[in-house]
């Protein structure tokens, strides 16, 4: 019965809910258990029987604890499109998916038509809550994607090449016609970075608080956003490029060049760490997986290649064009070509197959595709504005509030900013294999000693041999001549192992080269050999 809206113990609905939750917990416990329990009734050894019973009890307790942890810590499970029969997932259109999802997810798919200031590029914050879009003709818009609100928009009245968020949504950088500029969320200009020149692409390294840019002269710049210091400025020597991406695993910058080459850079190296010939034509797009071991490249030879960066080898190659590439948090790959956006899914062994397709209105040219973190959304910047499409299974369903929190308050944002400044990594920690940090450096091979070092060792050995005291003996065996002779023998014994090294270092080895039977002599000297060749 119910009394004043409170469920009593005799309420049948309450008993059904409780029974359902118990059945669900039992299923989870069975999934984490290690099979059926052992039959201990036939054992005669009491000691062994007690030990096995204790282990079985521990296994049951651990399975129950794992089921409870999964219930509270992993409440959401990501799902993909599941076809029935002969259906293909890439035939599902957006209009057929939207009625099947909840209202909140259906609101996240939209088209914003802005034909005057396009084409558009876009960027998300690491927690996926805020988005900034930049039009080629100077339009900047800052949006809260969680509440679907426009925070601010303004015009810079200059060409905009790229946009990038800095440590959080309070500051963002815009690559304009002459220099990159930094604005706050209200649209106020904070800084002008004249040292970067005319930048074409921007990338922010959040663990190191570095802003990286590549300008029209092929110069790569690194600037520390916490101190304002210019960390590095290198010339790539491979000409103009607008293909730039950062590897989230090791913070190495990847640049794509006109002759099909891809170079990887870090701020403490004048030369590139890796130079790869990826395509026969110019490189048009590059993307790195979240784990950092997979890389996708697209070139003018109409190829999309998947690379394993642990071996620097091609895993798979596909015949397709792509102007932009991006990996999602769950490993989906998005590519754009003209007005077509294709989503690829890993079917096992890095074998990517087409998962979804989305064709824009005829005439729209897609400039950039970017997955929104922690959401099943793919943002599309095109010539007539920007859009977003639903991609089931692309985003991470469970977020860690200590890493990225889409619901963070103002106090949490301030604490996170201070913590990021305290945990800031130095530029020297950027390397291809970050696991090498905090390990013991391997010993280098022994190098040959110089002539002066060998002479010093000989002098030290002679002095040590001269200071050796000779034991006095009786019956005329301790004569001064014999004692002097013994000292000379000790000096020679100490010098002998170092004399050969000294002769080799001076270029006069003692041993003569012997001509063996297998040695091939010149024709003019073969007649002098004992056994003529």
Image (tube, rainbow, N blue to C red):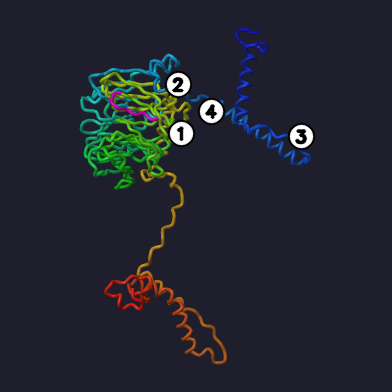
Query: In the rendering, which numbered label is found on residue 348?
Result: 1
Q: Main secondary structure of the magenta part?
A: strand
Rate crowding at label 4 as few (under 14), some (14 to 19) or many (20 or more) other CA atoms within 10 Å: few
Q: Mark 3 sits on what residue?
A: 41
* Comparing labels 1 and 3, the label whose residue is closer to the camera: 1
Mark 1 or mark 3, earlier in chain: 3
* Comparing labels 3 and 2, the label whose residue is closer to the camera: 2
* Comparing labels 1 and 4, the label whose residue is closer to the camera: 1
Q: Which residues are magenta?
A: 332-339
Indicate the position of residue 473 as horizontal and vertical percent values.
56, 87
Q: Mark 2 sits on what residue?
A: 86
Whole-angstrom CA distance, mark 3 to mark 4, is 38 Å
* Comparing labels 3 and 4, the label whose residue is closer to the camera: 3
Q: Quadrant of residue 54?
A: top right
Does the image show residue 205? no
Whole-angstrom CA distance, mark 3 to mark 2, is 52 Å
The residue tagged with tag 2: helix, strand or loop? Answer: loop
Q: Nearer the viewer, residue 269 or 382?
A: 382
Q: Mark 4 sits on what residue?
A: 73
Quadrant location, the N terminus: top right
């Amino acid at each position: 019965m119910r009394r004043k809206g409170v469920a009593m113990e005799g309420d049948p609905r309450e008993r059904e809910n409780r029974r359902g939750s118990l059945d669900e917990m039992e299923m989870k416990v069975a999934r984490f258990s290690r099979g059926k329990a052992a039959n201990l009734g036939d054992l005669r050894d009491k000691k062994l029987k007690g030990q096995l019973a204790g282990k079985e009890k521990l296994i049951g307790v651990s399975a129950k604890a794992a089921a409870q942890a999964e219930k509270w810590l992993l409440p959401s499970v990501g799902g993909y499109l599941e076809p029935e029969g002969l259906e293909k997932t890439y035939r599902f259109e957006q209009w057929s998916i939207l009625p099947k999802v909840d209202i909140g997810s259906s609101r996240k798919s939209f088209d914003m038509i802005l034909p005057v200031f396009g084409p558009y590029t876009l960027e998300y914050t690491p927690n996926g809550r805020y988005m900034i879009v930049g039009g080629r003709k100077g339009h900047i818009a800052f949006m809260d994607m969680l509440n679907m609100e426009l925070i601010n928009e303004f015009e810079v009245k200059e060409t905009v090449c790229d946009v990038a968020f800095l440590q959080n949504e309070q500051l963002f950088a815009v690559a304009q016609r002459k220099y990159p500029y930094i604005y706050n969320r209200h649209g106020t200009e904070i800084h002008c970075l004249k040292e970067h020149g005319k930048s074409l692409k921007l990338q922010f390294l959040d663990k190191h608080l570095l802003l990286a840019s590549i300008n029209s002269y092929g110069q790569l710049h690194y600037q520390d956003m916490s101190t304002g210091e210019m960390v590095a400025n290198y010339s790539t020597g491979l000409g103009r490029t607008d293909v730039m991406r950062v590897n989230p695993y090791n913070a190495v910058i990847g640049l794509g060049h006109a002759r099909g080459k891809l170079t990887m850079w870090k701020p403490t190296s004048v030369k590139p760490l890796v130079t790869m010939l990826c395509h026969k034509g110019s490189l048009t797009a590059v993307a790195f997986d979240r784990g950092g071991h997979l890389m996708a490249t697209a070139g003018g030879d109409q190829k999309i290649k998947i690379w394993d960066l642990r071996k620097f080898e091609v895993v798979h190659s596909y015949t397709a064009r792509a102007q932009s590439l991006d990996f999602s948090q769950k490993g989906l790959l998005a590519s754009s070509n003209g007005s077509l956006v294709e989503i690829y899914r890993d079917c096992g062994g890095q074998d990517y197959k087409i998962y979804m397709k989305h064709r824009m209105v005829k005439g729209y040219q897609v400039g950039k595709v970017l997955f929104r973190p922690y959401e099943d959304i793919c943002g599309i910047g095109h010539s007539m504005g920007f859009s977003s499409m639903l991609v089931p299974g692309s985003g991470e369903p469970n977020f860690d509030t200590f890493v990225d929190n889409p619901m963070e308050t103002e106090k949490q944002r301030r604490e996170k900013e201070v913590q990021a400044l305290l945990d800031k990594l130095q530029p020297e920690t950027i390397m291809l294999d970050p696991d090498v940090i905090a390990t013991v450096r391997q010993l280098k091979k022994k190098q040959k000693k110089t002539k002066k070092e060998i002479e010093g060792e000989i002098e030290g050995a002679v002095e040590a041999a001269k200071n050796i005291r000779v034991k006095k003996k009786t019956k005329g065996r301790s004569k001064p001549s014999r004692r002097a002779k013994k000292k000379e023998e000790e000096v020679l014994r100490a010098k002998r192992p170092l004399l050969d090294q000294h002769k080799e270092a001076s270029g006069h080895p003692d041993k003569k080269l012997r001509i063996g039977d297998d040695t091939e002599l010149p024709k003019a000297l073969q007649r002098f050999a004992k056994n003529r060749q």
